[in-house]
Image (cartoon, rainbow, N blue to C red):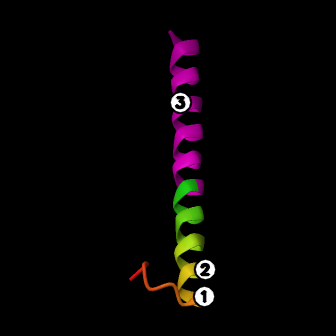
Amino acid sequence: MLRAFRAARKYRVVTVTHDECATITQLQTISNALVSGDPLVA
C-alpha cells in the first residue's frame, strides 16, 4: 500500500509539472503574439 501511495504521489508531481510547463508555454506564446502585434490575441 505504501508503494502505491508513493507511485500516486510521484504521478501527481509529474502531472503538476506538466501543467506548469503548459501554462508557461501558453504565456510565452501570448507574449510573442503581443510583441509581434498579432490582433488575434487580446
| Residue type at numbered disc 1 | Ser
Q: Position of residue 31 (x, y in %)?
A: 56, 80
In front: label 2 or label 3: 2
> Which range is magenta?
1-21
Q: Is residue 35 above or below residue 16?
A: below
Image: 24 above or below 5? below
How far apart are the alpha carbons under marks 1 and 3? 41 Å
Q: Position of residue 38 (x, y in %)?
A: 51, 84
Q: Which residue does the image show at 53% across and 40% down from the upper left?
A: 15
**Quarter placement of the C terminus:** bottom left
The residue nearer to you, when weighing 27 against 34, is 34
Q: Residues within 10 Å of mark 2 (few under 14, many from 20)?
A: few
The residue that mark 1 highlights is 36
Above or below 22: residue 4: above
Q: Position of residue 32 (x, y in %)?
A: 61, 80
* Residue 6 falls inside the magenta stretch: yes
Q: Are marks 1 and 2 in contact (CB under 8 Å)?
A: yes
> Mark 2 is on which residue type?
Asn
User: Toward the viewer: 4 or 24?
Assistant: 24
Per the rendering, the mark at residue 9 is 3
**Residue plotted at (60% across, 55% down):** 21
